[in-house]
Image (cartoon, helix red, strand yellow):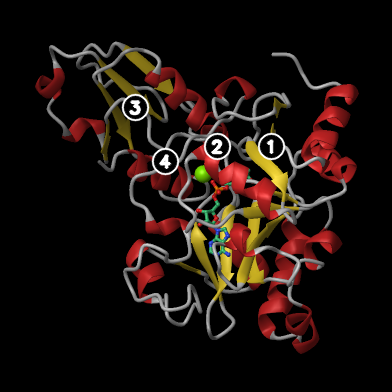
Amino acid sequence: MNLASEQDIEAAAGCLRGGGVVAFPTETVYGLGANALDADAVAKVFAAKDRPSFDPLIVHTASIQAAWDLVDPATWEAQGPAMVTAQKLAEAFWPGPLTLVLPKAAAVPGIVTSGLPTVGLRVPGHALARQLIEQAGVPLAAPSANMFGAMSPTRAEHVTVPCDLVLDGGPCTTGVESTVVAFDAADQPVILRLGGLAVEAIEAVVGGSVQVLTLAEVESRLPEAGAVPGAVPGDPRVPGPGMLGKHYAPRTPLRLVERLGDVDPDEWHDRRVGLLSLAGDTGGGAGFAAVEALSPLGDLTAAAARLFDAMHRLDAAELELIVAEAVPEQGLGRAINDRLRRASTR
Ligand code: TXA
Ligand code: MG
């Protein structure tokens, strides 16, 4: 590990101003950033990741005010209930692992939002990320810095996508991507992607329960979400991360089980199998070739911070199969289970 120096950050900022692509740390995962206001620069990000153009990018700013500058002014003037809730959430959780999907200002090019009228906005919690944005002097459109569909990078060493520069900011402290919150036709917040900010924390600020949309629900809401002109339910251009089952996946096949005790270890007794679970308890059974314990004390926030790191290690261990045990469905445990579920989809 070779943490970025002031000179490295200035070089990266200059590169971004010149239309380059830079991998940089955030508290959630490493991002692959480009000037969000420069369509040509953003196109390089899609190309580097081999990312389909229908999957919109999150725009990162250094301050709450800079984020609001990218929201459609008419939405501001109307001051509807969605904006009131959005402001409350931003004040409570920015900088941090929350992305708010709001009507976009004209300055945001269509390539960033895949043609959607909305833009995902986030002020990252990592100080180096904010410094980089500040010095570049432009907002950064940045997806996670992995090839499309693969596991997210939580260390600079995990970044394998081609880019002009990688800034090392150490291991990510949150470890799963931001929670993505949009607003429905009734101005109610809905969660499009579980992530590093717990649902419970959002509900405490909103003052009521908040719906977490499933893949099917994201699709069925497509027409009222405004979405892509001419799109129909089930259209692959549906806005939102729920649209693709398989995601966040290691190369090694991953099987998700509710409880390790429920499966017969004979199933894999003569194969090289790895275990990924909260406590790393093998149940006294089968000889696992590798074991990753996310948090022996059962701390789900700590477990989330280690999730992708552990998956990267298991993926490098030349296993035939990774068996992952689901974690309790609460706090960041929900985001962990979501990522494991998608990683196990073939
Ligand atoms: O923590 C994170 O969110 C990381 C760091 C780098 O900030 N970024 C990240 O970006 O995870 P990405 O591109 O891997 O995932 C962003 C998700 C996408 O699946 C996309 O569909 C959704 O956010 N998204 C972005 N803009 C949207 C919009 N206007 N409407 C609905 N969903 C949107
Ligand atoms: Mg991603």
Which is in the foreground here, disc 4 or disc 1?
1
Please state which of residues 213 and 232 is positioned toward the viewer in this rendering.
232
Residue 273 is situated, as x and y percent measured from the top left of the image, at 25, 18
In this picture, is 295 found above or below 98? above
Marker disc for residue 21: 1
* Distance Cα–Cα, label 3 vs label 1: 26 Å
Residue 48's label in the rendered image is 2
Q: Which residue is mark 4?
A: 149
Is 325 left, or right, of 301 in this rendering? left
Residue placed at 45% from the left, 18% from the top?
313
Give the residue type at disc 2: Ala
User: What is the spatial separation of the Cα atoms under label 3 and label 2, in whole angstroms?
Assistant: 19 Å
| Contact flag, marks 2 and 1 (Cβ < 8 Å) | yes
Task: Tell me which residue sits at (80%, 86%) in the image.
Answer: 77
Q: Are marks 3 and 1 in contact (CB under 8 Å)?
A: no
Q: Which residue is mark 3?
A: 251
* Disc 4 from disc 1: Cα separation: 19 Å
Tag 4–tag 2 contact (CB < 8 Å): no
User: Which amino acid, mark 4?
Assistant: Gly
Give the label, 3 or 1, closer to the camera. 1
Is the residue marked by circle 1 packed among few (<14), some (14-19), or many (20+) residues within 10 Å?
many
Mark number displayed over residue 319:
none
Left or right: 139 with respect to 340?
right
| Number of the front mark, 3 or 2 | 2
Please state the horizontal and vertical placement of residue 87, each as a whole percent of the image. 76, 70
Inspect the image, locate mark 1, and give the three-letter code of the amino acid beneath it.
Val
Residue 84, image x, y percentages:
73, 78
Position of residue 252 in the picture relative to residue 135 (left or right) = left
Tally the marks: 4
Q: Ligand 1: does it lie within 8 Å of the C-beta at label 2? A: no
Relative image position of residue 94 (x, y in whole percent): 75, 55
Between discs 4 and 3, the one toward the N terminus: 4
